Image (tube, helix red, strand yellow):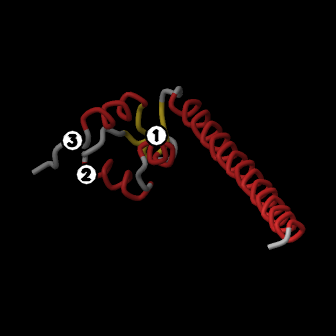
Amino acid sequence: MSQDHAENAAQSVIERLDRLDALVGQRLVQLVVERTNRLEERVHELSGHLRIQNRRHLSVKEFAQLAGLSAWYVRNLCLSGRLVASKRANDRKWVLTAQELDRYRRDGLLPAKG
């Protein structure tokens, strides 16, 4: 192998390594941006949950979001007495307290009646 051929091969390897390094750097930046975006979304979601949770009464939808349940399931749990809830006088919708959310998270559902 001639010296020129060896130098050309070495230069080709260096160029490939430089391209690979650039691709890895770009992917790393992309991963950091994606992770940062996910973290920002989670912070926004948690701040909304804190605003809701700091209220005295929660709607079924709010309780469901904070508890990780569906609103339909929470309504059924209210109806069956497995969650402590009351109905608002003006529109007869279920409301739950922040204390009930804490109790649910700590102790789970109340026993089934009957």
Q: Position of residue 9 (x, y in %)?
A: 81, 68
For mark 1, what is the residue? 89
Mark 3 surroundings: few (<14), some (14-19) or many (≥20) residues within 10 A: some
Q: Select label 2 or label 3 by which is in front.
A: 3
For mark 3, what is the residue? 110
Mark 3, secondary structure of its residue: loop
> Could you give the CA–CA distance between mark 1 and mark 3, rounded to whole angstroms?
24 Å
Q: Position of residue 35 (x, y in %)?
A: 65, 46
Residue 7 placement: quadrant: bottom right
Depth order, front residue of 76/101: 101
**Comes first in the chain, label 2 or label 1:** 2
- Left/right placement of residue 28 relative to residue 8 reads left
| Residue drawn at the location 57% of the way across and 36% of the way down | 46
Q: Select label 1 or label 3 by which is in front.
A: 3
Quadrant occupied by the N terminus: bottom right
- Left/right placement of residue 104 relative to residue 1 reads left
- Left/right placement of residue 89 relative to residue 47 reads left
For mark 2, what is the residue? 80
Tell me the amino acid under the disc marked 2: Ser
